[in-house]
């Protein structure tokens, strides 16, 4: 059952474009920035990326990830203060192999890369297990 807290986090995810995803192989941390789409009914995030790099090795070792989306970053006049909203989420990330789900996933991604121009495109999904919204409003 969705709470008001979950609903406000979901609203923020609907407005965002890019997520930072933290992964680890159990020992070494790694972070990637990816554009995403949200399936609001199922609380699933979809990502499109190249099927290369360290992310696949890390995900094979540990598929439980943590990510964040940040919106509205502002700097104060002295650049010491900022205001922003963020959504922190956790869940299992996996590669999608089913072509029908891949097609549905790509349609959810607002700023999707040109997969025809990609060498080896890959669609991934993250079923959100936990999410929370945070606000940081600092006086100017």
Image (cartoon, rainbow, N blue to C red):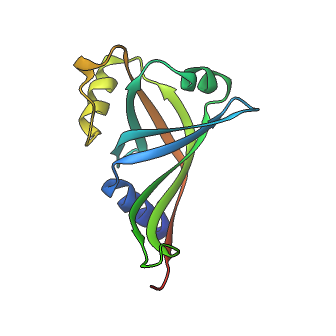
Q: Along the horizontal axis of the image, is 106 left or right of 36?
A: left
- The quadrant in which the C terminus is found is bottom left
Q: Residue at x 49, y 40 (%)?
A: 127
Quarter residue 22 falls in: top right
Is 134 drawn above or below residue 113 in the view shown? below
Asked whether the viewer can see residue 91, the reply is yes
> Where is residue 138 shown, x and y percent of the image?
50, 80
Q: Residue at x 36, y 40 (%)?
A: 35
Quarter residue 42 falls in: top left
Is 15 drawn above or below residue 42 in the view shown? below
Give the camera-side residue of 84 and 15: 84
Q: Along the horizontal axis of the image, is 45 left or right of 88?
A: left
> Where is residue 77 shown, x and y percent of the image?
42, 79
> Where is residue 36 shown, x and y percent of the image?
36, 41
Q: Residue furthest front?
A: 78
Asked whether the viewer can see residue 1, the reply is no
Quarter residue 64 falls in: top right
Q: Residue at x 48, y 18 (%)?
A: 52
> Where is residue 80 shown, x and y percent of the image?
53, 74
Q: Along the horizontal axis of the image, is 19 left or right of 111?
A: right
The mark tally for this picture is 0
Is 13 drawn above or below residue 44 in the view shown? below
Q: Residue at x 35, y 54 (%)?
A: 16
Give the camera-side residue of 19 and 138: 138
């Amino acid at each position: 059952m969705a709470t008001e807290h979950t609903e406000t986090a979901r609203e923020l995810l609907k407005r965002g474009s890019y997520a930072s995803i933290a992964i680890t192989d159990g020992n070494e941390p790694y972070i990637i920035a990816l554009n995403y789409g949200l399936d609001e009914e199922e609380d699933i995030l979809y990502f499109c990326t190249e099927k290369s790099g360290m992310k696949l090795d890390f995900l094979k070792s540990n598929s439980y990830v943590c990510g964040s989306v940040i919106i509205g970053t502002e700097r104060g006049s002295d650049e010491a203060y900022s205001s922003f909203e963020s959504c922190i989420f956790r869940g299992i990330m996996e590669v999608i192999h089913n072509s029908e789900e891949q097609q549905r996933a790509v349609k959810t991604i607002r700023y999707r890369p040109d997969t025809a121009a990609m060498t080896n495109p890959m669609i991934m999904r993250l079923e959100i297990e936990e999410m929370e919204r945070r606000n940081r409003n600092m006086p100017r």
